[in-house]
Amino acid sequence: MDFDLKKDFDKLGELHEAMTGLVKAADLRGGNMDETENAKFDALNTEHTNLEKAIERKKTLKGHKSQEVEKVEQIAERKNESVDEVINFKEESRKAYQSYLKNGFKGMSQKEIEVMQRAQTSGTDSEGGFTVDETMSSSIIKTMAEFGGVRSVATILSTATGGVLNYPTNNDSANVGEWLAEASAAAAQDTVFGNVALNAWKASSDYMLITRDLIQDSAFNIEEYINGLIADRIGRLTNTAYTVGVGTTTPHGVITAASEGAVTDVTLVVDFDDLLDLKHSVDRAYRNNGKWMLNDTVLKGLKKTAIASANQSLWQEGIIGGAPATIDGQEYVVNNDMADVTAQSHSVAYGDFSKFVIRDVTGIEVLRSEQLNMLKNAITYVGFMRTDSALVDTSAVKYLRTLGT
């Protein structure tokens, strides 16, 4: 599907002008915006932020088609099959999955059961579990990237099994070469390698109840509905863990693993000096691929400050040629699992988030039960995904800490 984004970017410009007009009107009066103007500004900013997110979703969707083609080609090469064979199996697997969701194992044809068994990566118990084929589960995982933002900037590593994976780590940013005199020998300068253990913590969607009447309705797309709920619920759950998880029974969060880069004593709105201190606390080797991460409330405060002070370095509207909005010239990610600006909070992070690795075990498992809520005339579903994460280079990302008690 093709999207014409010009209209969206034009609308972004209109909203930006309207917000700027409110701030300028208050400046001309020599005071701050009144309660009514603040409410209008907040409403315009909410619409602006939602439109920015919609544009990013459309950009993502435009890229999905090429990504899916590449995914199919990779699977075909790994399985030593043709692309057509992989595509045909994907369609057969989708039909088997739809049949399972509607009818359970007892209502599936022999061919559908054979397709399902071929797609499984683990055993199936008598209650019934369907491991969604990797070409299908990838669409669920892509949708999950919209919830919070960490997944959209991290490095994603998919593995076929869930055993502990020792991922290599190193930081060579402090090492340099040397000038040699003629016939002199080069000195040894070892790179220190380590490793971080990536586990496979199980995330659950929790129960999803659907009435039998709705399931039997031919107009009801049960696959789309179940997959959407799984993506929404597990997407929100995992993003919180990818942000602030402790790494013992959940993934290890990027903010948990990162180190302090700068401090601020401002407890309402982060100022530009604080952001520059944070940015330059990160080694310049990582800044070429640097991005900001903050929540929507903190971003709103930055926008207000930038518009009021006409400081386009602090926040620059991204409306020219489809370019993204920036903070000090670099893209930012809105992650509402980041903290607000309060005492001792870590409200803004900056760095190369590609050094944050998310490990996914291929396949999302869906269980179906007719007995659990049969008195409610409902079928119960639950989805599971196994994942973990780690910041493999702790010098790559740093956060801003707010002082106070």
Image: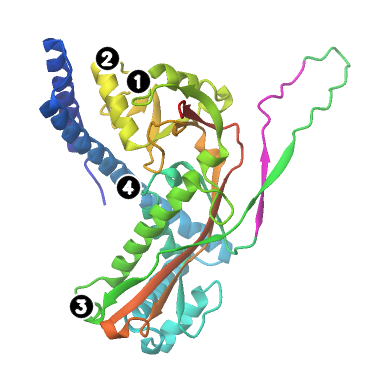
* Label 2 crowd bin: few (<14), some (14–19), many (20+), radius 10 Å: few
Q: Nearer the viewer, residue 189 or 387?
A: 387
Give the magenta range.
164-178
Q: Which mark is residue 314?
A: 1
User: Does 317 sit above or below residue 214?
Assistant: above
Q: CA distance from mark 3 to mark 1?
A: 52 Å
**Residue 218, which numbered label?**
3
For disc 2, the marked residue is: 309
Marks 3 and 4: CB-CB under 8 Å?
no
Please tell me how crowded label 4 is: few (under 14), some (14-19), or many (20+) other residues with Cα within 10 Å. some
Closer to the camera: disc 2 or disc 4?
2
Q: Amino acid at mark 3?
A: Ser
- Scheme of colours in the image: rainbow
Residue 103 horizontal/vertical position (percent): 33, 84
Looking at the rendered structure, the secondary structure element under dot 1 is loop
Left or right relative to 293: residue 180: right
Answer with mark 4 or mark 1, whichever residue precedes in sequence: 4
| C-beta proximity under 8 Å, tags 1 and 2 | yes
Q: Can you tell which mark lies on residue 62?
A: 4
